[in-house]
Image: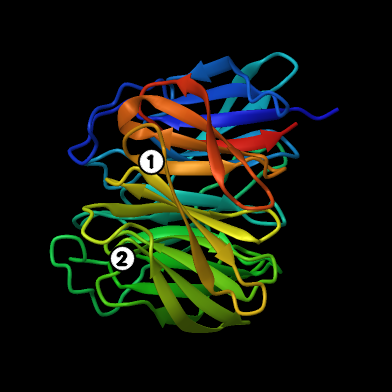
Amino acid sequence: MKKLYLAVGSLNREAPYFQGARGEGLSIYAFDTKTADTHRICGTSSVDNPTFLSVDPTSGAIYANSEVFGWHEGTVSAYRFDAEKGELVYLNKQSSQGSITAHNTITRDRKFVLVANYAMGSGGPDQSVVALPIHDDGSINPVTGAVRHEGELGPVEDRQERSHPHCIVETPEGGTFLSADLGLDEVIAYHLDDKGRFERQGSVAVAAGAGPRHIAQHPNGCFVYVSNELNSTVSLINRNGSDMKLIESWATIPSGVDSHGADIHLSPDGQFLYCSNRGHDSIAAFCVDQETGKLTDIGYTLTGGKTPRNFALTPDGEWLLVANQNSDCITIFARDQDTGKLSNTGKRIEIGTPVCVKPFTL
């Protein structure tokens, strides 16, 4: 019988834009889906600032971005979690060919890890999104395909001074990949060929100065939701193949609050959407109209900590876990699957500066 685990990335190297680095690096926890109890299994400090993780539930391979300030090239490290022995096995690492590695994803066919480099300053390879082939053992080869984003910059001068890719995700039907660029106020669509090379298919702009950060997609493949960091909104984009159209945007915080949008996820059934707010320190919840994709606000839930950079839903949709970066904890919420509302269980994982939590089964 498969068990549910949590891969957690936590900061262990200081950076000017982080408020401390008190974490271990990469940690694995067991999660009881009936009680929401957790216990730590293992961890390693051999990876620097693993700010984003992807997990292959077939092999137990974990891919961790290293976001280290001052490096012209970040790295992607491959580990394998051995559940029987309760240990992390280091496989290898490769250059991301860009600075400030912000996000990664495993392609549906399990052939590539795709990485988005947020990038700061200039110098080095300075690639926006890259593809790294995956070996049968889970280790990764050097980059085979890369592309640099270029275009008109947004109006927020101190944050949109250059292209800033913040994520790359695969569409539900597979084969198309969407990257949100905070600096260009765009979502860009790519095709990836069997050799890991990118071909741009199109793009769509969100509101000027919105700063798109992360993307969630409805199972129907048509509704794309974008969490906008700079103006704390969520935007609905309708997608038909490579054609994308901005439909509408909604605020994720009350008026007058100083906050920044962060992560975004849909419930497994596509009925409810959740967005995290850093500053307001909340999860905004919305009901999704299944015909139009439009959103209805159903309220905010305080996260029980500061700076909810990342959060995750368990595969069954019963639980929502929030990584509160500046409160050194992951808080655990129960989710009502009929109403979408969250309730704080009072249970939490005490861990220094957590920035990513990824549930997976083995």
Mark 2 Cα-neighbour bin, 10 Å: few <14, some 14–19, many ≥20 = many
- Percent across and percent down for residue 239 are 58, 80
Q: Can residue 198 be seen in this view?
A: no
Q: Which residue is drawn at 67% across and 36% down?
A: 360
Dividing the picture into quadrants, the one containing residue 312 is top right
Q: In this view, does 138 lie to the left or right of 181?
A: right
Q: Which of marks 1 and 2 is nearer the N terminus?
A: 2
Residue pointed to by mark 2: 211
Considering depth in this image, is 151 or 41 the residue closer to the camera? Answer: 41
Mark 1 Cα-neighbour bin, 10 Å: few <14, some 14–19, many ≥20 = many
Residue pointed to by mark 1: 308
Spatial CA distance of label 1 from label 2 is: 18 Å
Element under disc 2: loop
The correct choice, above or below, for 175 with respect to 51 in the image is below
Residue type, label 2: Gly
Q: Name the quadrant of the C terminus.
A: top right
Q: Can residue 38 be seen in this view?
A: yes
The correct choice, above or below, for 261 with respect to 238 in the image is above
Element under disc 1: strand
Q: In this rendering, which labeled residue sits more in front, label 1 or label 2?
A: 1
- Percent across and percent down for residue 334 are 60, 36
- Percent across and percent down for residue 151 are 29, 78
